[in-house]
Amino acid sequence: MATRAYVLAISMLMPIFLASFVSADPDLLQDVCVADLASADIKLNGFPCKSNITADDFFFAGLAKAALTNNTFGATVTPAFVQQVPGLNTLGVAMARIDYAPGGLNPPHTHPRATEIVFVLTGELDVGFITTANKLFTKTIKMGEVFTFPRGLIHFQINNGKVPAAVIAGFNSQLPGTQRAADTLFGSSPPVEDVVLTKAFQIGTKEVEKIKSRFAPMNKK
């Protein structure tokens, strides 16, 4: 009987034990740890805590208004990450607003540290993600609907409609990180060797150089 109770207790505790290894961010060990963004000399997995905190450290008004979308992709991400809301430090959550012009695209990218869920504020979007087995899951989502992008998988959103669209995105990390596929491969610094890209994409060197030229400003950073 005692052995059965022991096994039952272990089976109940094991999911909790394993969850501690797969959560996006470490658990906090105090009520709050507002990020001291000025402490550039101290390197931590996150940010050190500052001593003098106010309600403003937990506040951000930047998602209230639509952002301008007059850029290359016709879409703009306004983050509410730990850099914008220092009070998010150690809390394991963040948000963002994404605005799309008609035809606007949030190009294929990944968030290496977070799963993302989007809620459509207005308009309509075609969204999707691709698994490691190269299977595409895609959906058209409208105002009031939600869609989830699993952590680390390449995903995208595009506004194929004739009116602007906007979403609010939630993340289970204070700093989800973003890697755009094209920017990463063709705009890295130092640049990826042409031979790597020609073989990977089965195109010629001239094509690689032409694509790289589109991302040249990133190479100069």
Image (cartoon, rainbow, N blue to C red):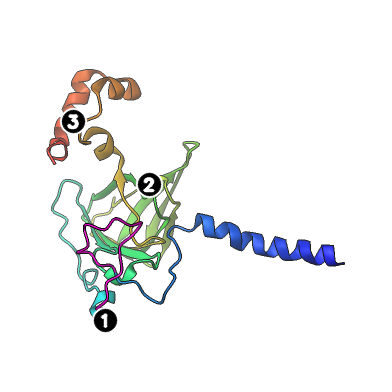
Q: Residue furthest bottom?
A: 55
Which residue does the numbered mark 1 point to in the structure image? 55
- Could you tell me if residue 184 is visible in this image? yes
Q: Work out whether residue 122 can be spotted.
A: no
User: Is residue 26 covered in magenta?
Assistant: no
- Viewer-proximal residue among 146 and 203: 203
Q: CA distance from mark 3 to mark 1?
A: 45 Å
In the depicted structure, whether residue 90 falls above or below residue 45: below
Which dot marks residue 21? none
Q: Provide the residue designation for mark 2.
A: 155
The picture places residue 39, in percent across and down from the top left corner, at 22, 62
Name the residue tied to disc 3: 212
Q: Quadrant of residue 42?
A: bottom left
The three-letter amino acid code for the residue at tag 1 is Ala
Q: In the image, what residue occupies the spot 21% across and 58% down?
A: 40
- Disc nearest the viewer among 2 and 3: 3
| Residue type at numbered disc 2 | His
Q: Residues in magenta?
A: 35-55
- Indicate left or right for 25 with 1 as reference: left
Q: Quadrant of the N terminus?
A: bottom right
> SS of the residue at dot 3?
helix
Q: Which of the marked residues, 2 or 3, is nearer the chain's N terminus?
A: 2
Q: Please, what is the dominant secondary structure of the magenta stretch?
A: loop
Inspect the image, locate mark 3, and give the three-letter code of the amino acid beneath it: Lys
Q: Would you place residue 114 above or below residue 179 in this image?
A: below
Residue 15 is situated, as x and y percent measured from the top left of the image, at 62, 60
At 43% across and 58% down in the image, what residue appears?
Answer: 147
Q: Secondary structure at mark 2?
A: strand
Q: x%, y% of residue 177? A: 32, 52
Q: Residues within 10 Å of mark 3 (few under 14, many from 20)?
A: many
